[in-house]
Image: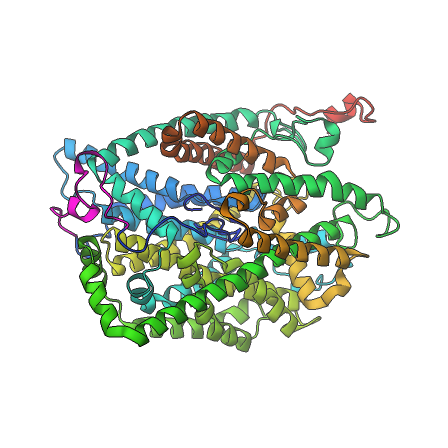
Amino acid sequence: MDSTQESSSIEVEDGRPGLVKRLGMGNSSPGFESKNAWNKPAVGDENELSIEQIFDSKKVPLWWEQITIRGLFASMVIGILLSIIVMKFNLTTGVIPSLNVSAGLLGFFFIKTWTKILEKAGLLITPFTRQENTVIQTCVVACTGIAFSGGFGSYMFAMSSKVASQVGNASPGFDAKDIKNPELSWMIGYLFVVSFTGLFSVVSLRKIMIIDYKLTYPSGTATAVLINGFHTPQGAKVARKQVLYLGKFFVASFLWGFFQWFYKAGDGCGFENFPTLGLQAYANKFYFDFSTSYIGAGMICPHLVNVSLLVGSIISYGIMWPLIEKREGDWYPANLPENNSLHGLTGYKVFISISLILGDGLYNFVKVMFVTFRSMYGEWKKKKKNESNQLQALDADITYDEQRRTEIFIKDAIPWWMAVCGYVGLSVISMGVIPTIFPPMKWYYILVAYIIAPVLAFCNAYGCGLTDWSLASNYGKLAIFIFGAWAGKGNGGVLAGLASCGVMLSIVSTASDLSQDFKTGYLTLSSPRSMFVSQVLGTAMGCIIGPCTFWLFYKAFDVGAKNGEYSAPFGELYRGMAILGVEGFSSLPHNCLKICYGFFAFAIAINIIRDRVPRRVCQYIPLPMAMAIPFYLGGYFAIDMFVGTVIVFIWQSCNRKSADVYVPAVASGLLCGGGIWSLPESILALAKVKPPICMKFLSRTSNIKVDDFLNT
């Protein structure tokens, strides 16, 4: 959701690194200083030297030398593996933890192993540098970012007839004009059209944001710290140990997924449907499903996010939905198809979740915009008032590291005319191509979107640099309401709103991602040109790998099935938003609007309180965006993630230093192992190889006979 860390973040339903690229939450106090952050002594034998002094004896490769064939091959392999993991999370809960540490460790391990083999054979020509490592990291994150921003589990899947039928055949938006079923050809074409535009929207402003304004970009800075550490003698030793931990837990998680497969011969079978807290709790989606992937995700995400998820599941499935269910026949018609109509209980779940998401998103949108414009105005006023004195002060106070980094960063400039021509050219192509894919999306809708997108992209990139919050999914939701209402009912307004969401989300998201990567490149002496090219190449990979990965899941499993393993829950949420934008409040069930008002106000109030109280108190107040996710999904994955946070808490209590070093590696191993098992599982499903055993639990009072159960 809009939500999804670096430093440890979560992306929800749409994003990338940042304390919830889909949660859109970040560290408001990132802990990184824009100046002199590198004056601290480094560990080990280099304790008297700054970072760039440690690397001073090493030549900085030219920008085209930083992009290598082996690096691109490694990026493609790692990109495929991580795209499978992101896709699994997309289609199960929509909660996507940051995979930056995983990408960094895997990239370092891949090339280090490669170079060591060649070195022993006497064939090594080009050493592995931190600049090449940065290019790999950038390429991988750009590739896997498409698996998120492509909307395969959200806006794109919301266009399908399957989601439309789940909303209800009699519900608004079931017209043929509002439906577009997934097909590999149009998905790849659409992503190639919309995914590159954002790269050109802010590239010319990189010097202003990185050098002039000295924006911190905490996620980009954290990635640079990771990469710089890998390439120091002491850091390389730690990295090898981290990779060893990652490998052990990857294998264990993968084998556990393989073992679980044997017991999943039918619907509702297997360990993932184990009623650990009792059958009544299981019926209300409270159970531990033994998912190592979500335990790993819980270890990566901050404690507050995991606790917020659990609190949200208790409030919704533990209290609210059972109470509303008792109003069946009063508040909503009785005997509606279970989980298949926005006019029944599902409507309350969908729209109340949306109200929390929109309340939290609106507050943070206004807040970040205010912080952004206030900061920009302050910088402009300061420079205008005393420009000459300021320059003298900067020159006098500049460090060796800053001087070296600025020199490299400015040297390989990207011409402004190239950015303008690229953006205009892609805009024209989009106006011609997108209406052929989505007929309700008129060319002038796209023109308006591309005119306002650069402003929003800059604001998002600037705000992300200040707070580490990417609000890309919020801009996408805003587009749903604006363009859906513009197209109107009966004219494909639902489809137009969802398609415009993809356009806006892609532009704004890639712009902030590129800015984060420029910060990483600045701190590792990587050329802006190599960063830009690696982003382009990674995005191109993602435009093919992302749809192909989704297609594998789509063909192998019953994606979108209400009670299935891959229910793609955000598809229904996004379609609900589009219907709300077209139909207005008339689409809501009885009394739902009043409850939505209450939760919308609740989300804003909680955020205001969080910003007003001291930090030591704020860390105990739940996050509305995180609370909203289980309102629709249930508490099963929240329990998994809470187990992960308990493991980390105990580990930190026993040995904080060890936990800080190895928790990311262990979590990445658990997360990746369980996620990668989805690949052989899908291949087995396509080959029609079924598990041999069904392990299922039934109540003593159940009317199902054993013989009937076995026959099913």
Is residue 9 placed above or below 474 in the rendered structure? above
Nearest the viewer among 198 and 623 is: 623
Which quadrant is the C terminus positioned in? top right
Asked if residue 57 lies in the magenta stretch, the reply is yes
The residue depicted at 68 percent of the width and 27 percent of the height is 275
Quarter of the image holding residue 444? bottom right
Specify whether residue 492 is in view: yes
The residue depicted at 41 percent of the width and 65 percent of the height is 198
Specify whether residue 475 is in view: no
Residue 450: x, y in percent?
A: 47, 72
Quarter of the image holding residue 428? bottom left
Q: Magenta region: which residues?
A: 37-60
Using residue 451 as the reference point, say whether residue 594 is left or right of it.
right
The residue depicted at 68 percent of the width and 44 percent of the height is 562
Prevalent SS, magenta region: loop
Asked if residue 352 lies in the magenta stretch, the reply is no
Nearest the viewer among 575 and 515 is: 515
Using residue 357 as the reference point, say whether residue 33 is left or right of it.
left
The residue depicted at 78 percent of the width and 55 percent of the height is 343
Residue 394: x, y in percent?
A: 23, 64
Quarter of the image holding residue 583? bottom right
Residue 568: x, y in percent?
A: 60, 47
